[in-house]
Image: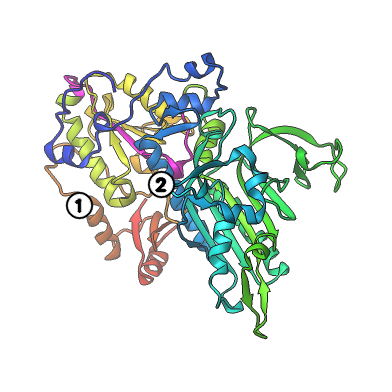
Amino acid sequence: MGSAVRPWRGPAPLRARWLLLSRLFQPRNLQAGGEAAADGELSCRSQRLMLQAGLIHPSSPGCFHYLPPAVRAMEKLVRVVDEEMREVAGQKLSMPSLSPEELWRASGRWDRMGTELFRLRDRHGKSYCLGPTHEEVVTELVAVQSSLTHKQLPLRLYQVSRKFRDEPKPRFGLLRSREFYMKDMYTFDISEEAARRTYSELCGAYGSLLGRLGLPFVQVQAATGNIGGSMSHEFQLPADIGEDKLVLCPEGHFAANVETLSREQTSCPTCGGKLTRTRGIEVGHTFYLGTKYSAVSNAVFYSPENKPLLAEMGCYGLGITRILAASIEVLSTEDSIRWPSLIAPYQLCFIPPKRGSREEEEEGAALLERVYDDVAEALPHLAGDSVLDDRTQLTIGKRLKDANKLGYPFVVIAGKRVCEDPPVFEVWNQNSGAGGHPHVHEAVPGRDRRGAASGPGVSAVPPLRRGAGPRRAGQDVQERRERVLQGEGVPESCHCLHRGAEEEVRGAGDERGAAHKQRGCTVLPG
């Protein structure tokens, strides 16, 4: 946690609104990570960086405390997952972690899973396992609904919950742990043809999700393993520390886990090109199960002829905590975290002037408040997604270095040029490495197509002037909106806020400006 920090002496209203860095429970340890290697446990970049940044803390082998910033990132990731699952008519539920022995014996997996299962008995001698997956449980749940009809299918049920697997040798932090979070979906269809359409749709949803995160994934043919079924694919992030060996066609015609190959394969079966070899981190896995589980539990639906038929099933796993760690593994440098912008714990870090500096005396903190208000007015989703580094006993350079290590996507600094008229703030895009003195709105994140923070923001932060007197939050923005909506000065380049998403309007003269006003848009000068 570091040494005690004197309270930041910024304006009282601002102190109440900011989330102060000194108040965050994020115990950083720059020496963390070396112990794992010393003890013989395999370590990797993501494990080391997450320990050093205070994102996770070890509890026991393969188990970790998820500290507040990591929980924020995980909650954001789950929101993105929920959005994608809603797009494919997924219904979210929650199932018990304790699964009764009889369900697993009926499917044959009680013995087949061996020592990977955590097993326990209650006081009455009844045996359970801590579920690594929930095929048996969800199939039994659907089976007891005896009145299920063809009109209720396809049925797509999913959950996000803790899973357990007794790894013989946990390693690589969250990439190979004994307790982890996973999104698992189970689908029920009326026919094999319908189930294969569902399979294709869910694979598309996984690709969409990983694409939104900006992760360089590949979809490969995979073995069905202990879960079973007749078709399976993995979603892999290529990485040197990946435990899966992959072969890929450079033209994208073929990709497979080498486990699926009966012999060594060097050329693409489609185009004949030479296959390349790489390693990957599995972050998602899909299975077409057929009637493997529905036959065991008699999970049937009634056809139009009122005949009971076995449901065709599929299951679809997505490693939530593994995506967090794998993202850091493939995007970060050796000493600095880089997040996918959608799931960074905080989007913005504001760095006020050093205590006692000329910039502080020139009311740099008060000007920072104005910037915060205007950004929050234009981009409300950032109001609770910003943190202020109030350790003003440290230099700006030291705090910027820490911000770089922690991976805030954007950093706004009240540096030397805040004393100019109009004042100028430095804005750093940590993911691109770009820094300079643009208007804040040119760098801070807006929203992606589903409403999550991503990419450049909108032109909504007016120039700050000294001696203008106090103004309420967003007053400049509102005045500019009113001027434009009254038909005054629609510029050659403006931005249009329509239904919550940014649409940039090029060459917006009077005619186009009027058209946008007619459809209820708010047009802002660029």
User: Magenta segment: does it hold 143?
Assistant: no
Q: State the residue position of label 1.
A: 475
Q: Secondary structure at mark 2?
A: helix
Q: Which residue is painted at 24% across and 34% down in the image?
A: 20
Note whether 123 is above or below 491 in the view shown. Answer: above
Give residue 223's position: percent from left, percent from top: 73, 45
Q: Nearer the viewer, residue 377 or 69?
A: 69
Identify the amino acid type marked 2.
Answer: Glu
Tell me if residue 355 is in the magenta stretch: yes
Q: Secondary structure at mark 1?
A: helix
Question: Is residue 525 at all visible to an observer of this figure?
Answer: yes
Q: Nearer the viewer, mark 1 or mark 2?
A: 2
To which quarter of the image does residue 114 belong? top right
> Seen in the image, is 155 located left or right of residue 409?
right
Q: Amino acid at mark 1?
A: Gln
The correct choice, above or below, for 419 with respect to 132 in the image is above
Residues in magenta, as a range: 336-359
Q: Residues within 10 Å of mark 2 (few under 14, many from 20)?
A: some
Q: Sequence-wise, which precedes: disc 1 or disc 2?
A: 2
Q: In terms of depth relative to the viewer, which is nearer, 359 or 190?
A: 190
Q: Which residue is mark 2?
A: 75
Q: Residue at x 68, y 74 (%)?
A: 309
- Extreme-front residue of the structure: 124
Within-10-Å neighbours for mark 1: few <14, some 14–19, many 20+ = some
Rendered location of residue 117, percent (x, y): 57, 41
